[in-house]
Amino acid sequence: MVARGLTRRFGDVIAVDNLDLTVERAQVYGFLGPNGSGKSTTIRMLCGLLLPSSGEIEVLGYKIPQQAEALKRRIGYMTQKFSLYDDLTVFENLDFVAAVHELTRANARTRIAELLKVYWLEELRGQLAGTLSGGQKQRLALAAAVLHKPELLLLDEPTSAVDPQSRREFWDSLFALVDAGTTILVSTHYMDEAERCHRLAILDRGRLVADGAPRELAAALPGQALLVECDAPRRAQSALTGFTGITAMAQIGASLRVLADGGDEQRVRIAQHLREAGIDAKVEPTMANLEDVFVAATRRSSASGSVAEKKS
Ligand SMILES: Nc1ncnc2c1ncn2[C@@H]1O[C@H](COP(=O)(O)OP(=O)(O)OP(=O)(O)O)[C@@H](O)[C@H]1O
């Protein structure tokens, strides 16, 4: 999948701003971004549900939106909102989806039996979908989305309504699909899910602010992540507020995680500043994680956005 200069405006709002993306086959490609950053709008354009204002998209060899109808037969789409019928049973929902995809009766029965087994739905086959738990609904929705064996699966925040155990099981199912050759595009708010993607695009206010493999992104983080250990992390945080070269701070349990520009001299300056404020603290470098990458990328983008706004 390749997108170049992908842009979508809604009136004055630029929901997606000049996005360039390349997604290889049989990978999980993630979109990570805050609310309103353009994840859903991007996914909807990539699967031909929404027209771009400008830009070019090619998915599985089809030009989108011109050949969107042909593409639709080869993709599956699942959103955070449960979009099946509450008053049909698990089996009836899958049977309905099989009819939409025009499977023969015999093929539908074989495929549904397979899906009920793979997604642990056999015992629930006669239960009304509306009475399923969040995790069960999501397994049913995934079964429905892959019923026609799509080559590409687009998932828009599929795990936002389920517990951590169900999320883990859901991701196991995604990797099983990838092993079978499916390409998966998934948007998420969760850092642990983002870490599991082969590659990741970080969006902020419609713009691509970073992309790459999660580990590469963490390794390429400009500046450094520091851990401040002391008796009074809240006091340390307020002492460091406004300190030049600090991008972000967050209290993690009894310590303070600091994202700072520069190298070791900056770490020493921070330790010195805390000492002068009467706080006895150990300031040590720590491994950057994806949350650091996310915070640094979105802060950088806000800073450049405000410069652009001032200029205009
Ligand atoms: N149909 C629409 N009409 C007008 N504005 C829209 C429409 N769809 C999206 N937007 C706007 O476009 C921007 C991006 O929204 P989008 O839903 O793509 O973000 P998102 O990253 O998926 O957010 P969330 O995580 O909250 O789902 C927002 O400012 C939103 O209000």
Image (spheres, rainbow, N blue to C red):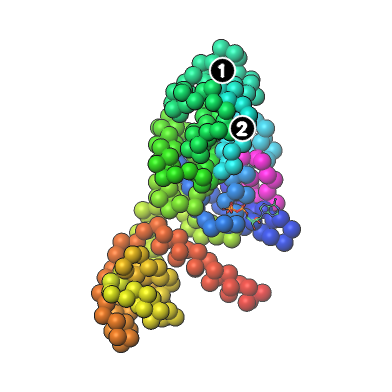
- Looking at the image, which residue is at 59% across and 38% down? 82
Compare residues 59 and 9 and report the one nearer the observer. Answer: 9
Compare residues 242 and 117 and report the one nearer the observer. Answer: 117
- Looking at the image, which residue is at 40% across and 50% down? 192
Residue 5 position, x and y percent, is: 61, 53
Residue 259 position, x and y percent, is: 38, 69
Q: Is residue 56 magenta?
A: yes
Q: Disc 1 or disc 2, which is closer to the eye?
A: 2
Residue 224 position, x and y percent, is: 35, 68
Q: In the rendered image, which residue does mark 2 sit on?
A: 86
Quick check: 20 above or below 82? Answer: below
Q: Which mark is residue 240?
A: none
Q: Alpha-carbon neighbours of circle 1 within 10 Å: few (<14), some, or many (≥20)?
A: many
Q: From this viewpoint, which residue is outermost toward the front?
A: 131
Compare residues 256 and 88 and report the one nearer the observer. Answer: 88
Q: In the rendered image, which residue does mark 1 sit on?
A: 108
Give the magenta part as a residue range.
45-57
Q: For numbered disc 1, what is the local secondary structure?
A: helix
Q: For numbered disc 2, what is the local secondary structure?
A: loop
- Looking at the image, which residue is at 43% across and 53% down? 191
Q: Quadrant of the N terminus?
A: top right
Quick check: 288 above or below 238? Answer: above
Q: Is residue 115 visible?
A: no
Q: Earlier in the sequence, mark 1 or mark 2?
A: 2
Instruction: Please tell me in which quarter of the rendered image ligand 1 is found.
Output: bottom right
The amino acid type found where label 1 is placed reads Ala
Q: Is residue 131 magenta?
A: no
Q: Is mark 2 within 8 Å of ligand 1?
A: no
